[in-house]
Image: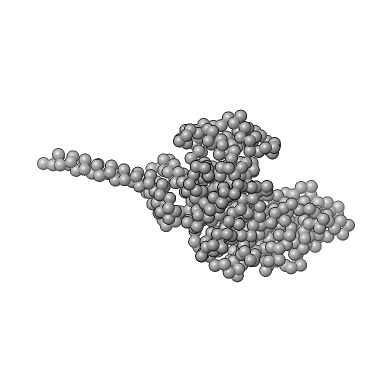
């Protein structure tokens, strides 16, 4: 991948000519709106009324033309009604780390975003998508587990041309991954091999970071590089993690709210669609600690039959799910049952020490759905006391899911599955995961022996009827 900022900027300038490749902003007020009596008055979008950047006709202007002179703000912000697409003007590259950033409409089709990043990576498609999600604030991990986790992720990523996806903020597991990649770059000959893409909301990051990104963008009007919130407002928001290669800031038109899992989920689907005779992309999600909001990530992966690795010992959600998997499985992990409400409550009470969830029945329902018997082959646990390393657990998860898919293959899919299996063998050799190759080779050896026996039997039979 060429690290030239000019190439990244040229790429975005080219793509923003597309109809959907836009940003989004609030249109309740516009750049001409003023509020001299209340200079710090806020719009429902979170900006001060006098600090909107929209240049078109605002909803306020339309109301005024219709005879409504009260100029009252709406009681609530409705994204579909109160926002509009606008040209992209926040994009560039942050020095010295070289993080490429882009502020984009959160409704952008993921195909467009994937293609943009793929072009920036020289057209080299990822062989593996690693989604690493979980802990954010107050997240800690014991030293040895942290080292093993980072080493395993970097090993898996460098062996496979992986793209890593995180929440992209300078806190929790995103920070841990970003800093781990930074250390790797300092030690390796090819510093840009690992692609790490952060996905967060423009409204999630703090105002100082937003101003910095605007200032670093060539296309952003300098007169608009002003604070959009009052000076006296206390912010407890985050900045972006700058060791990521890319940071995608989805914009809903408002300066608050958090990103749900839909963009990441759709991005992974898009990446894995790009399959041909020469290329396959696999996806694995790693859950490190995590709050109950992370259940959405797990549910989406279960729905798409993507394997999940739970880092046991990292805390909270990862440990809740790992504990329940072990409690409701036999020693060989080939027989399972659904956990009871009491077992779920006990696990939550053990790892979520305060009553941090309001709708207990919903949470229990989500966990029960995740732990249904038919989903267990998707759930894998990395235990530092038992398993060799995280990378091997990742590869094992991929092979297990591939093997399970073979069981449910439809007539006529055998040839395609064989091709996929061939690619998997090649990858296993690349990854030095020989345990993954053996079952495939053994099955093929059995097929060859069976075919030889059938050939011999057929040959003998034809000799008997020969005149």
> What residue is rendered at 50% in x and 33% in y?
329
Do we see residue 413 in this rendering? Answer: yes
> What residue is rendered at 21% in x and 43% in y?
456
In the rendered image, residue 225, in percent from the top left (x then y), is placed at 75, 64
For residue 64, above or below residue 464: below
Q: Quadrant of the C terminus?
A: top left
For residue 405, above or below residue 328: below
For residue 217, above or below residue 166: below
Whether residue 443 sits left or right of residue 161 in the image: it is: left
In the rendered image, residue 414, in percent from the top left (x then y), is placed at 38, 46
* Image quadrant where residue 29 sits: bottom right
Q: Which residue reaches farthest left?
A: 467
In the rendered image, residue 335, in percent from the top left (x then y), is placed at 47, 33
> What residue is rendered at 53% in x and 32% in y?
328
The colour scheme used to paint the residues is one colour
Whether residue 88 sits left or right of residue 377 in the image: it is: right
Do we see residue 250 in this rendering? Answer: no
Foreground residue among 267 and 384 = 384
């Amino acid at each position: 991948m060429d690290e030239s900022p000019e190439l990244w900027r040229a790429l975005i300038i080219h793509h923003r000519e597309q109809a959907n490749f836009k940003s989004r902003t609030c249109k309740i007020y516009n750049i001409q709106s003023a509020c001299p009596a209340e200079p710090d008055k806020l719009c429902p979008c979170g900006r001060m009324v006098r600090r909107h950047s929209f240049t078109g006709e605002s909803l306020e202007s339309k109301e005024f033309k219709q005879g409504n002179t009260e100029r009252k703000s709406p009681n609530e912000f409705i994204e579909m009604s109160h926002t509009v697409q606008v040209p992209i003007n926040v994009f560039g590259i942050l020095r010295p780390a070289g993080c490429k950033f882009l502020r984009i409409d959160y409704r952008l089709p993921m195909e467009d975003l994937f293609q943009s990043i793929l072009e920036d990576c020289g057209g080299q498609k990822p062989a593996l998508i690693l989604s690493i999600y979980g802990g954010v604030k107050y997240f800690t991990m014991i030293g040895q587990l942290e080292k093993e986790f980072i080493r395993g992720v970097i090993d898996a990523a460098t062996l496979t041309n992986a793209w890593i996806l995180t929440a992209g903020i300078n806190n929790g597991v995103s920070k841990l991954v970003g800093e781990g990649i930074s250390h790797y770059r300092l030690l390796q000959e090819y510093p840009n091999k690992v692609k790490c893409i952060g996905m967060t909301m423009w409204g999630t990051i703090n105002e100082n970071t937003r101003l910095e990104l605007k200032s670093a963008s060539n296309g952003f009007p300098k007169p608009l590089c002003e604070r959009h919130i009052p000076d006296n407002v206390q912010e407890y928001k985050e900045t972006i993690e700058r060791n990521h290669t890319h940071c995608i800031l989805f914009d809903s038109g408002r300066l608050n709210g958090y990103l749900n899992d839909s963009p990441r989920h759709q991005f992974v689907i898009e990446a894995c669609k790009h399959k041909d005779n020469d290329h396959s992309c696999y996806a694995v999600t790693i859950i490190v600690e995590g709050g109950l909001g992370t259940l959405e990530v797990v549910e989406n992966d279960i729905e798409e039959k993507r394997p999940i690795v739970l880092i046991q010992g990292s805390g909270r959600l990862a440990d809740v799910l790992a504990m329940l998997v072990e409690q409701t499985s036999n020693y060989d992990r080939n027989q399972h049952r659904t956990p009871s409400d009491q077992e779920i409550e006990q696990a939550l009470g053990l790892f979520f020490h305060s009553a941090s969830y309001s709708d207990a029945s919903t949470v229990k329902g989500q966990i029960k759905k995740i732990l249904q018997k038919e989903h267990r082959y998707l759930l894998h646990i990395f235990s530092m006391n038992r398993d060799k390393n995280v990378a091997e657990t990742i590869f094992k998860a991929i092979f297990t899911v591939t093997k399970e898919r073979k069981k449910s293959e439809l007539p006529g899919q055998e040839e395609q599955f064989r091709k996929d299996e061939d690619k998997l063998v090649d990858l296993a050799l690349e990854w030095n995961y020989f345990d993954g190759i053996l079952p495939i080779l053994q099955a093929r050896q059995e097929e060859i022996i069976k075919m030889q026996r059938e050939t011999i039997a057929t040959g003998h039979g034809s000799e008997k009827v020969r005149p």
